[in-house]
Amino acid sequence: MVKEKLEKQLMAELSRRNTDFIVHWAQNQPGAIEELVEMVLSHQEVVASRAAWVLEKLSGNYSGLLDAHIPKIIKSLSAIPSSSTRRTIAKVLMFHQIPEESEGELLDFCLRMIEAAKEPVAVKANCMTLVFSLLPKYPELKNEIFALIENQIPYSSPAIYARYHVLKRKHFPEKTKKKLRN
């Protein structure tokens, strides 16, 4: 019953107003969050993309609401066929604390996305943000990750260059200041 209502409403209209309506409805509806996660992980591209947008808004408004689902989402990231859904889910993950047991899998996914030649800039940028949020726990990977991203910059848009330098300054300000002085 919940699934049918969600699908019908998701497909009724692609608008911020409809998304806000679904967000409001889903937060108080038992089983709605689980159904939205399942829809995102389905291979129905349009429904998955719209459900991901709802999850993004829910995550931004109600931190912790998806915490129980984060490991399952991370496990399924590589199977999501749509780049727009991958972009949105990467953004959703930015709102949540990543469980330690899922960090390696998320790092692996993000690094593959950053390195993928045909992956859209928005996916790469969101993945970069996720990688930088995990990097303080894994300082031994810093040089390798910096090199990977810096190797991508000549082949990427200016947005990748800008995001990289913003993240680098935010997470490693002492390294950036020393480099700028030289």
Image (spheres, helix red, strand yellow):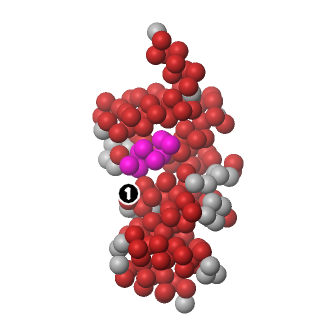
| Three-letter code for the amino acid on which mark 1 is drawn | Ser
Q: Does the magenta stretch mainly form a helix, a strand or a loop? A: helix
Q: Residue at x 63, y 34 (%)?
A: 136
Q: Is residue 147 left or right of residue 69?
A: left
Which residue occupies 55% across, 85% down? Answer: 2
Instruction: Name the foreground residue: 79 vs 150.
Output: 150
Residue that lies at the very extreme toward the right in this rendered image: 100
Vertical position of residue 162 compared to residue 69: above or below: above
Residue 128 is a magenta residue = yes
Secondary structure category for the residue under label 1: helix
Q: Is residue 125 inside the magenta stretch?
A: yes
Query: For the N terminus, which image quadrant?
Result: bottom right
Q: Which residues are magenta?
A: 122-129
Residue on which the image places disc 1: 83
Q: Is residue 162 above or below residue 50?
A: above
Dot 1 surroundings within 10 Å: few (below 14), some, or many (20 or more)? some
Say if residue 136 shows up in the picture: yes
